[in-house]
Every structure is written in C-alpha cells, then in structure tokens.
Amino acid sequence: MLMNIGDKIKFFREKKGLSQAQMAELLNMSVQGYGNIERGDTDVNYSRLELISKELGVKPEQIVGFGENNSFVNSNNNILGDHSSCQVFTDKDLAHSLEKSQLENAFLKEKIQSQQTEIENLKEIVALLKGNKG
C-alpha cells in the first residue's frame, strides 16, 4: 500500500499530536477544507504544502516522498517502504514542480546577469583608478 500526500500529512500530523481542527486553525482554513486535503479530495499546491510542512516540522520533500530516507510507517507500525516506493505524484504535482523549477531558473539567470554587470562595472572602476595612479 502506497501512501498518498494526504496520508503522509495525516501521518505527520498525528505524530505531532495535532487534531485536524488544530491543524486547520494553524493553517487558517476550515476543518472541512483541511480534511479534504488529508482525504486526497483536494490537490495541495506547493505554497500550501510549505505551510503544512512548516507546521508539522518536516520538509515538503518528506510529504511528497522524494529525497533520501523517506520511510513511512502506518498506524499498525508497518513500514510502507523507502522513498522510491512512497512516491505519489499527480500531473499537477509534476507541473507545479516544473513551473517552480523554471521560475527558480529564471531568477538565478537574472541574478547571474546582474552580478556579471556588477563585475564589469567594478572592472571599469579599477581601470579608471589604475589610470589615475599612472
């Protein structure tokens, strides 16, 4: 039996000793809305996943099931597998992950360009300073 994201959230919530109502309050949402997440009736976007994982004291990767050492145990203390057998991704999960990676890539490219421009400006300043000393 594989755990979906809702099952994993429930697992970590129970491990932390929180009720659904307490978790819903922490996330500033209705109990019904939060219950829909745990039942898998609602897809969880990455920003909501980050909030949930923060409240549960885990990394988002531990909930979605990628990364190392992601073994999960159900309520009967049966190990449900290592990270490779716990991966459950929907098309929305993958599309969101791709979109997030593309945004991060664009941001980093802009940052590199800005730093390259700054380096060129500093080189010009150094050249001007050297010219004044000569």
Image: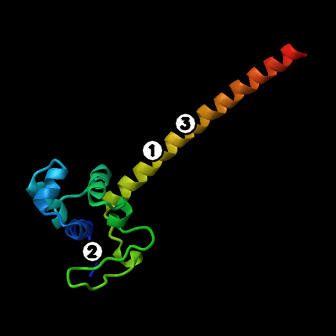
Residue on which disc 1 sits = 103
User: Which residue appears at 21% of the width and 85% of the height?
Assistant: 76
- The vertical placement of 54 against 4, above or below, is above
Whether residue 113 is visible, yes or no, is: yes
Q: How many marks?
A: 3
Task: Identify which amino acid the numbered label 3 is placed on.
Answer: Glu
Q: Which mark is residue 44?
A: none
Along the viewing direction, whichever of 11 and 94 lies nearer the viewer: 11
Residue 7 pos. (x, y %): 22, 70
* C-alpha distance separating marks 2 and 3: 39 Å
First of labels 1, 3 by sequence position: 1
Q: Which quadrant would residue 111 be assigned to in this image?
A: top right
First of labels 1, 2 by sequence position: 2
Q: Which mark is residue 110?
A: 3
Q: In what element is the residue under mark 2? A: loop
Whether residue 40 is visible, yes or no, is: no
Residue 120 pos. (x, y %): 71, 28
Question: Which residue occupies the extreme front position in the image?
Answer: 17
